[in-house]
Image (spheres, helix red, strand yellow):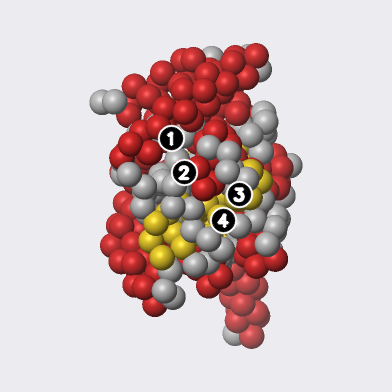
Amino acid sequence: MKTLTTAAVAASMTFAFASEALATEWNVSLWGKRRAFTEHVEKLAELVSEKTGGEFTLNISYGGLSKNTENLDGISIGAFEMAQFCAGYHRDKNPSITVLELPFLGVESLEQEREISMALYDHPAVKADLARWNATLLMPSPLPQYNFVGVGDAPRTLDDFKGLSVRATGGIGAAMETIGAVPTSMSATEVRQALDSGVVKAVSFAPHAHMSFGTIETGSWWTTNLNPGTVNCPVVINTDALNALSDTERTALLGSVDEALEYYIDYYNNQTMAKWGPALDERGIERVSYGPEEIAAFKAAAAGPAATAWIEENSARGLPAQELYDFVTGMVGQ
């Protein structure tokens, strides 16, 4: 009887170790803290775990695995299996998707941003571009138009931006340059200190980031309708890790993307934006709006030259840049 009990225990331990060995854990590199911008990744982790009975888990880290500007590099060497980054952090590393950061594209909603991003991510040239980093694009992080929170005298006309140092990346930075602002690119985690110390006088973010990274704790004004553009921040997977998944795991992961994005958009629209107005009011932040003629002039000055420069630069890289630009603007106009 004692022998049988020992054998049973041994068998149980063997089964337990086998089960543990079969479980799949992925490390996911994000930054900052949990916020609207990361809710689709949090939801994805929840869904994947549910669908696999806990046998496939996503371990989410907020800054513990890599700097946000180095997440694509980490993916390329397999330092972690999944990560989020913004295209404007390193335009030369992912030039194909920077088309989505061009100013004044005319995208009007998070739903449209999601649709266009997902379609572009499936374009052969974009897949090949990210494949250089052993990366597969999984899903976007749809964001509304960026606007500025700033300190000092509020720019009441576009001319008032001349000489103003602003944090603005990618196409937004290029747009601001056309009206005489002095853009500088820095990661989101560096922004509060830069604003507090006077390195920059204004910061472009979507509303959730202004709240998460504390610019509204320092700022005294906010532009309501400058709307120069937005950034594109995809979630990517190490391609080797994706290929190593079982069919069940891959189905659980890829089959959860739509639900995760729907949750994200609902969260952003109905929770984050509901907090934005009251957050400005509580802090006495002035709302600065610009007339339609000024906005039209800004768009005319910024949109065309930025698009032309983007197409020329990326055609020289060997990308089908005109095709990618037409692809995106064609979807916007539908």
The residue carrying mark 2 is 158
Considering only vertical position in the picture, is 330 above or below 107?
above
- Give the mark nearest the N terminus, 4 or 1: 4
Which mark is drawn over residue 164? 3
Which residue does the image show at 37% across and 24% down from the upper left?
Answer: 329
Up-down relation of residue 24 to residue 77 (above or below):
below
**Which amino acid, mark 3?**
Leu
Q: In the depicted view, which residue is nearer to us: 201 or 18?
A: 201
* Element assignment for label 2: helix
Image quadrant where one finds the C terminus: top left
- Secondary structure at badge 1 equals helix
Q: Is residue 325 visible?
A: yes
Give the mark nearer the N terminus: 2 vs 4.
2
Q: Identify the element where label 4 is drawn.
A: strand
> Between disc 1 and disc 2, whose residue precedes?
2
Label 3 vs 1, first from the N-terminus: 3
Q: Name the residue under label 1.
A: 298
Comparing 32 with 289, the one in front is 289
Q: Contact (CB < 8 A) between labels 3 and 4?
A: yes
Q: Which of marks 3 and 4 is in front?
A: 3
